[in-house]
Structures are given as C-alpha cells and as structure tokens.
Amino acid sequence: MALFRTLRVLSLPALALGLGAASAVAADLPERPSAGDIIKTSKPADWRPTDPANTLYMDLPTGRVVIELAPDFAPLGVANIKTMVKEHYFDGLAVIRSQDNYVAQWGDPNAETKPKSLGTAKAKVPGEFTAPLANDKHFVLQKDADGYAPQIGHSNGFPVGRDPKAKTTWLAHCYGMVGVGRDNDTDSGSGSELYAITGHAPRHLDRNITLLGRVISGMPLLTTLPRGSEALGFYGPNEARMPIVSVRLEADVPEAERSHFEVMRSEAPIYEQVLEAQRNRGGPWNKYAANYLELCNAAIPVRERPKQ
Amino acid sequence: MALFRTLRVLSLPALALGLGAASAVAADLPERPSAGDIIKTSKPADWRPTDPANTLYMDLPTGRVVIELAPDFAPLGVANIKTMVKEHYFDGLAVIRSQDNYVAQWGDPNAETKPKSLGTAKAKVPGEFTAPLANDKHFVLQKDADGYAPQIGHSNGFPVGRDPKAKTTWLAHCYGMVGVGRDNDTDSGSGSELYAITGHAPRHLDRNITLLGRVISGMPLLTTLPRGSEALGFYGPNEARMPIVSVRLEADVPEAERSHFEVMRSEAPIYEQVLEAQRNRGGPWNKYAANYLELCNAAIPVRERPKQ
C-alpha cells in the first residue's frame, strides 16, 4: 500500500488573504491543482535563466552549491564579494560553522590566527541591511500579512520585506538565503564570511544584517554537514571542516562546466497561481485550507533548463 | 579578531506586541539581557523534568533522539504508539525518508512489500488534527498575531495554535515537532510512520495531520541524514537507510541508561521574559528590534538536569 507517501508539501490554491480570516474547515475540501500541477503547465517565458554575472558556484568536494546574488539589494556587498571571487579568495577556505536549525557559515578557518589576505577587496563595507524602496523595480506584492514587515513579496526570485512609509526594502531571512557575517559594527561584514540559513527562517535578523543572495541548488551539501561542537555550532580545532574547492562567478566558468538553472519569474501570472495553490490547498489529502501563506513558506521554483 | 562569531540567535527583549506595530529602528539599540542571559537566571522550579511515561527514546547507531509526547492533544495516537513501543514494533525499522527543508520520516522500509506486524496496535486511529480547547489546561498565550491561527502560545513546552470561536486547539508544525504520517483517509495514520520537521515550519500542515510530540534532543541525528534520492526524499531501494536500534518509553528504561532532560515551564514567568527577549533584541549587535515574534521562531528551552 502506498501509505504515508502522501505527506506532501505541494497542495492547492483558490482564495487568499490576510490574517485570521475565516478559513474553510471541511471534511472534504474540493480538489484543486497543486503548486506542482500548476508549475507543470508553465511556459518557457515563465522562467528566467540565472544571470552569469550574478551567480556564484561554490564547489565543494561533495558537489556544487549555486547562489544567485541580489545586487539591487546589496550592491556594495555583492561588488566586494565578486572582487574576492575573482581573486580566488575563497578557494581553499572551508565551512567553519554548522549550527542546527540555524546556519551553515563559511570563510577563513584561520581568520583569528593567520588570516588570508583579502587582496584588493575591502575589509569594511557599509552594511546594507535595507535598501531604498526605489532600488527594487521588480517587486510583486504577496497579499498575506506579516509580523516582521509591513509588506512582503518577491523580487526577481528573492523573498522581500518592505516598509512603504519608511521607503525601505530588504531581503528576508528565508531558508537558503545567504548573508554577510559581521561583528557589532555595521560595516564589519566584508563578505569574507558568508552564511546560509539552514533551518526555520530567523526573520528577526531581517534589517539587522546584509543579505545578498539565495542558494538555488545544493542546499543538502550544507544542511547535512555535521554540526560543530563549539558554541554556536563552530567547528573546534580538532574537527574536520568541509573544504571549499573554489568559488567562481558563473560568467567565468566555461560553458561546458556550467549548471543551467532557471528560476520562475516572480512577476509571471503563473507565480501568483503557484502562491495561491500553497495558500489554499485542496483535497483529498488536505482537510483544512489555511487561507494564509507565510513568506518563507512560499516556494520559489527553480529547475534545470529543459533540454533543447 | 573575533569577527563573525557574533552572528547569534539570542539577543534582547523589552517591548512586545502584535502585527505591524511601529518598531524601533535605531543606530544604537539599548543593551538588553538576551534570552540566554535570562535563562541563566532561572531557578530549578522554572524547569520541568520529562515525564518518563510520555517520553520516547529513539536510539539510532549514531545516538539518541528524545521525543516528548503530548497526550493531551492526541490521546489516541499517543496510546497506539505506546502499544507499538511496548511491543518493540519500531526496533529494527529505519529512517525511510529525508527531504531537505521538510521532514525526516521513519517506519517500516518494507511497508509496501512485507510489512511488519503491528501486534496489538491498531491499524487505523481517528485523526486528531485538533483537540477540544478544554483538553488543554496549560495554555499560555503568546501575544503575537499569527496567520495560521487566531491565537498562538505554548502548552507544557509545546507550540500551540487555537481557535477560541471554534473551541479547538492544535499543536503547531514547528521545527522538531513529530507527527503521524497518513494517507488520504483521516484515520489512516496509525503511528507506524512518524516524521519530524527538519526545516522551515510547514504551518499549512497544522490541522491537517496528527502532531503528537516534539524532539527535545538529538535533532542533528535526523537533520544531517543524507537526503533520499526518490520523490519526496524517500530513499530508493539501493540507498542505505539509518536503522533504528530501538524505540523505548523512558519509563521502561533503567535509570542508569536514562537521559535527564528538563524543559522550561511554559507557565513560568521567566518564560514570558525569554519570549520578550527574542521579540525585541537589544544592542550592540542588533540594530533593529522587530517587536514581533513568530510562534516557530520562539525557543522552547531544554537542558540536561543539573548535577545534584
């Protein structure tokens, strides 16, 4: 029997809206197309290939982590990281921290004893914890209310919070988002240490730290790493760290070695249907439709480019 | 330099409240005790030892996963699982599924070919997707608004949603929560397959499936497992599965082999301070206080019983 094979993520759409609205509690919810069903109806134009100038490949011995960068939200941080990448700063460094239900973090294991030279990259970069609203020309509103942001939505495949009154926008700390480790000073995050969110979205970090990218492939290479035994999940001196073979910009990788990922366009009408499908899911498996979708519970579909 | 060692989870309290309230955005937030600071001031009476009659030990070759059961919320499911445990049903079974940013699931790898006998346990158990409000005598309100529940809070160390109008309550699908895998029929979840949430909280599953426990120790034993290569993260026939040595009730484990965990009392005044500390965090590291705390972003402290 196919028991328990149906604990699925993807389910079904219809309604919409805010907080605490009356939701359908029915013994039998109507069947509705799942998010997966809807994605299958997508057309090529609904997908955006990664921009080679804004995509990083972090190659580990175990495989490749692909990171899309968001220069609209963190132009200075992204520029500094690209300098480091071009100068092969990350090559030979390692994953230095893995904390359960929080982050994997990578950088220079000898940062405190014999730090690797940053080359021409800056040691200090102004924090880009928020960006001016006007910098984001691609925002698509997600209608659900949110406790950490007056507005939420998506911009070019990134999850976003906004404050229209303050005229600021920022990336949200959803699973897979990549940010810049820093000390107390707001300009202390050069990008030489980066982290990815590997657990429940720590949204309290929004507006407190520079986020500048999203892992679109390879998360298990990070999430399955042993947890560090020191405080905050840092690896101790006697613990093996996953080494970084290289971090390269997709544009600098020969075509034959490139991955070919595509992200669903946030502004495509089909994406709103995908969100609706997750906001209100139908039967027969689901028995209750939430009529709500949390920002970091909203899938941002990625696929390998179909063979041509 | 101690750079980047300060990407901390724990930070600082003060205010409180609902949705979209104006929050402090200051270059320098005042310092406030962190949740960790507050926990250090706790007294023995602020902690509740696990109830041996409602605590499971799932021993894997790699270590022990400790699960607190919530019989107030799922009395039938918990009873059926205890029957299975007493009859050693789970011993020799395995983790059958590991899906990134979702669940680890365990049960009978041969469920579809040569299923292990359930002994005297029931094959069908009524779904306990919600419970009558009156069944929960321990609820402590968390004042933050929530999109998936009219009210949220904690009950005896479990994260909870409630609908006072419908007079129902239910456990919330936060990280580490344990539920009963099922098929389409609401009574198809016997407890012979269980899952734990290993990624961002899939709150859309609330009220759709029986939750009945929480992992309080050993999550990394599940979260670091390789992801299954089949659909939904199930392991294929040629993939190694983490075996289950045994699942036992703490009450049936000799004292010398017991773990001794304690959970902070949800009703203790100090726990409200711990929540406040996470709701509004202070400087110098934090620069922005969210003035909001998501249910599944609220820590539920666990510790090993201090030596006496």
Image (cartoon, coloured by chain):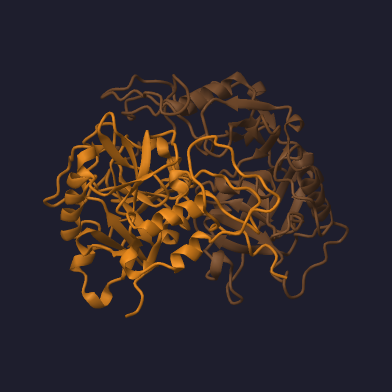
Chain colours: A orange, B brown
Question: Which quarter shows the C terminus of chain B?
Answer: top right
Left or right: B272 in relation to A299: right
- Location of residue A307 with respect to B45 vertically, above or below: below
Seen from the viewer's position, the closer of residues A124 and A130 is: A130
Count all numbered tags in the image, as a single digit.
0
Q: Position of residue B18 (x, y in %)?
A: 47, 26
Q: In the image, is B18 to the left or to the right of B56?
A: left
Q: At 38% across and 43% down in the image, what residue appears?
A: A173
- Does residue B244 appear to the left or right of A253 in the view shown? right
Q: Quadrant of residue B21?
A: top left
**Residue A307's quadrant in the figure?**
bottom left
Could you tell me if residue A299 is visible in this image? no
Q: Nearer the viewer, residue B144 or B214?
A: B144
Q: Could one spot residue A7 in this view of the protein?
A: yes
Q: Position of residue B277 (x, y in %)?
A: 47, 25
Question: x and y percent of residue A109 in the render?
Answer: 31, 50
User: In the figure, A138 relative to A49: above or below?
Assistant: above
Q: Position of residue A298 (x, y in %)?
A: 45, 50
Q: Quadrant of the N terminus of chain B?
A: top left
Q: Is residue A299 above or below residue B159?
A: below
In front of the other: A120 or A302: A302
| Residue, far bottom | A308
Q: Nearer the viewer, residue A278 or B271?
A: A278
Q: Residue at (71%, 64%) from the top-left corner?
A: B93
> Which residue is farthest right?
B120
